[in-house]
Image (spheres, grey):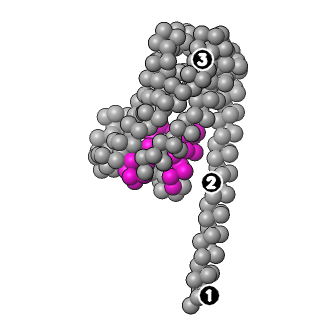
């Protein structure tokens, strides 16, 4: 069954070309629960066969992700938290999802829009609290494109290297996601520890000046 679905996706992306990649990644990055793996991995496979440009596939994939993220950003910015909490469920946005990503954004600041793009369950919705918090759009776009670009590059590489070997792709992807989660956790741990130290030094300096 999985093999048939993958084949269908490969044929669809191949038929629609780069537009298909853009649309699928737009959906994945906005409110529609569409997995990015089924768009970018087949694109990488097609690139390995010479049927697509790896660079063009990367740019359209990352561009689609950015467009979908900006769409969510605008939703958060224009509609606000109360509206999304009340009506978000009609477009697959659960209140607990908003709470989770908003907490993540508040804890780690604007940089969370970069790191959040690498985390399952956070990736699709981190744009909402950024919009609600009225983060500067240019900074948001840069962070988002960089984070989405890394994720697209990872998936394209898997498709390019492993091709139709679904089990190998699933195995490697599983370990990669685990490694990414550990890496992001380590970065945020260092970030919080460093900020805490700076805060303590600042308080000590204030006390000396009294």
Residue 11 sits inside the magenta stretch? no
Please tell me which residue lies in front, 199 or 121.
199
Please tell me which residue lies in front, 126 or 97.
126
Which of the numbered marks, if any, corresponds to residue 63?
Answer: none
Residue at left offset 56%, top offset 22%:
56
The residue at which mark 1 appears reads as 208
Q: Nearer the viewer, mark 2 or mark 1?
A: 1
Q: CA distance from mark 2 to mark 3?
A: 35 Å
Please tell me which residue lies in front, 137 or 96.
137
Q: Is residue 80 left or right of residue 122?
A: left
Q: Residue 206, position in %: x, y?
A: 57, 83
Name the N-terminal-most of marks 2 and 3. Answer: 3
Residue at left offset 61%, top offset 61%:
192
Q: Is residue 50 above or below residue 117?
A: above
The residue at which mark 3 appears reads as 53
Q: Secondary structure at mark 3?
A: loop
Residue at left offset 51%, top offset 43%:
142
The image quadrant of residue 154 is top right
Q: Residue 182, position in %: x, y?
A: 68, 45
Q: Are marks 2 and 3 in contact (CB under 8 Å)?
A: no
The image quadrant of residue 183 is top right
> Does residue 5 show up?
no
């Amino acid at each position: 069954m999985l093999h048939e679905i993958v084949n269908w996706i490969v044929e669809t992306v191949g038929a629609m070309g780069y537009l298909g990649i853009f649309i699928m990644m737009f959906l994945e990055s906005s409110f529609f629960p569409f997995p990015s793996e089924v768009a970018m991995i087949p694109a990488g496979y097609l690139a390995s066969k010479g049927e697509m440009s790896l660079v063009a596939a990367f740019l359209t994939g990352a561009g689609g992700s950015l467009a979908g993220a900006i769409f969510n950003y605008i939703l958060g910015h224009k509609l606000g938290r109360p509206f999304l909490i009340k009506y978000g469920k009609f477009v697959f946005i659960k209140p607990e999802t908003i709470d989770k990503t908003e907490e993540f954004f508040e804890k780690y600041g604007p940089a969370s829009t970069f790191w959040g793009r690498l985390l399952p369950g956070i990736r699709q919705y981190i744009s909402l609290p950024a919009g609600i918090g009225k983060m500067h759009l240019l900074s948001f776009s840069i962070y988002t494109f960089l984070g989405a670009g890394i994720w697209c590059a990872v998936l394209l590489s898997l498709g390019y290297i492993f091709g139709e070997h679904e089990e190998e792709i699933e195995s490697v992807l599983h370990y990669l996601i685990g490694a990414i989660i550990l890496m992001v956790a380590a970065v945020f741990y260092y970030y919080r520890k460093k900020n805490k130290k700076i805060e303590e030094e600042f308080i000590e300096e204030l006390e000396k000046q009294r």
